[in-house]
């Protein structure tokens, strides 16, 4: 017995500290609803690619996870975090988007019997952008190279899909494209909890990529904001109310779209976008200095191409 214990101790000591750490710790949002708040910096070996938020809902039938992590290692860390909250197994996973940390852990949970749910538009984007998603994350660190993409086998058609699990109603809604095309939200009407996915960023500035359509994102956000949410679990940042969400996502998107649209219509230069508005109310957000310029550039280039 001592020899066996010594063997396990030797193996444990040989593992890097990040592999032994409790990466995922769920915090209570309201009764039976929890959130893991990921780091607001980049993916690293230490955070297992979990630089985004993950949801957990404990139902009578088992645990439901909102988004599955950036591959098998992060999915295993999510499962470990779930076990600290409940002894019920993960019976379902709902994807809100197609960025790596939203769905690349699907295969891990599916192999353990969980049902994977997503909107058809989300799955379409997962498939369309698969190569670019894998190339980016697999080039980050060797721990992300073991990937087996798995999509929801029976995605919800249209703009909404409803599923009742263990007495809890989950409403999966697609309003319009957001951070990624096909992004969706998960709404718990009874609990008034909104898992916004990447429709919402708080505490850090949101990012507009070349594939992001800011006008569509603003439209999706404004429809989403009509939900009577008491608690919002954003894609990034702390659990918030709608006042903070509006101030740090809604107001920024609206000002960005209005400033770029006005500049393009007036045949102005890209530099006019920044000088024509006061952006100081957003400067406290993490990564503002790094992302605001890119947001203006990507939005300007897209709208200039569409409007001219």
Image (cartoon, helix red, strand yellow):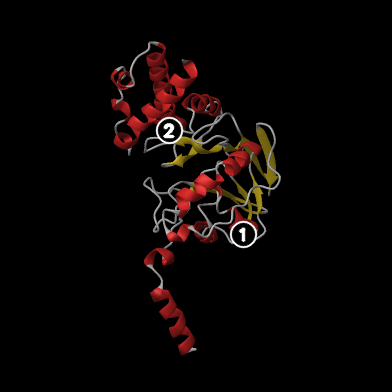
Between 209 and 39, the residue placed more toward the observer is: 209
Q: Which mark is residue 152?
A: none
Q: Is residue 114 left or right of residue 2?
A: right
Residue 156 position within the rendered picture, expressed as x and y whole percent measured from the top left: 69, 39
On residue 88, which mark appears? 1
**Label 2: which residue?**
208
Relative to 226, does residue 203 appear above or below in the rendering? Answer: below
Q: Position of residue 204 (x, y in %)?
A: 37, 38
Residue in the picture at 45% in, 25% down: 302
* Residue sitting nearer the eye, 262 or 301: 301
In this orientation, does residue 80 appear?
Answer: yes
- Could you tell me which residue is drawn at 43 percent across and 53 percent down? 139
Quadrant in which residue 61 is drawn: bottom right
Farthest residue to the top: give it: 266
Task: Tell me what residue is drawn at x 51 percent, y 32 percent.
Answer: 178
Up/down of 86 relative to 190, above or below: below
Q: Residue at coordinates 41% horizontally, 29% vertically from top-left?
A: 298
Please tell me how crowded label 2 is: few (under 14), some (14-19), or many (20+) other residues with Cα within 10 Å: many
**Would you say residue 32 is visible in this rendering?**
no
């Amino acid at each position: 017995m001592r020899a066996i214990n010594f063997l396990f101790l030797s193996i444990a000591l040989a593992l890097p500290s990040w592999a032994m750490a409790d990466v995922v710790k769920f915090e209570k949002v309201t009764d039976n609803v929890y959130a893991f708040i990921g780091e607001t910096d980049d993916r690293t070996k230490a955070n297992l690619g979990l630089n985004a938020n993950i949801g957990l809902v404990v139902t009578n039938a088992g645990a439901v996870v909102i988004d599955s992590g950036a591959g098998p290692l992060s999915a295993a860390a999510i499962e470990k975090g779930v076990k600290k909250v409940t002894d019920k197994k993960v019976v379902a996973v709902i994807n809100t988007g197609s960025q790596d940390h939203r769905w690349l852990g699907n295969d891990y949970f599916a192999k353990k019997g969980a049902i994977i749910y997503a909107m058809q538009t989300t799955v379409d984007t997962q498939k369309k952008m698969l190569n670019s998603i894998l190339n980016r994350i697999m080039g980050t660190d060797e721990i992300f190279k073991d990937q087996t993409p798995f999509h929801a086998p029976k995605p919800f058609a249209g703009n909404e899909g409803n599923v009742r699990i263990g007495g809890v109603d989950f409403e999966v809604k697609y309003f319009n494209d957001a951070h990624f095309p096909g992004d969706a939200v998960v709404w718990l009407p009874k609990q008034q909890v909104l898992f916004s996915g990447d429709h919402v960023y708080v505490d850090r500035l949101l990012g507009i990529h070349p594939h992001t359509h800011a006008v569509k994102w603003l439209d999706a956000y404004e429809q989403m904001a009509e939900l009577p949410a008491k608690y919002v679990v954003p894609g990034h940042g702390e659990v918030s109310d709608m006042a903070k969400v509006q101030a740090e996502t809604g107001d920024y998107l609206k000002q960005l779209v209005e400033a770029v649209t006005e500049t393009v219509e007036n045949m102005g230069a890209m530099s006019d976008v920044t000088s024509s508005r006061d952006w100081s109310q957003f400067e406290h957000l993490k990564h503002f200095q790094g992302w605001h310029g890119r947001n203006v550039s990507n939005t300007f280039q897209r709208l200039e191409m569409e409007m001219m």
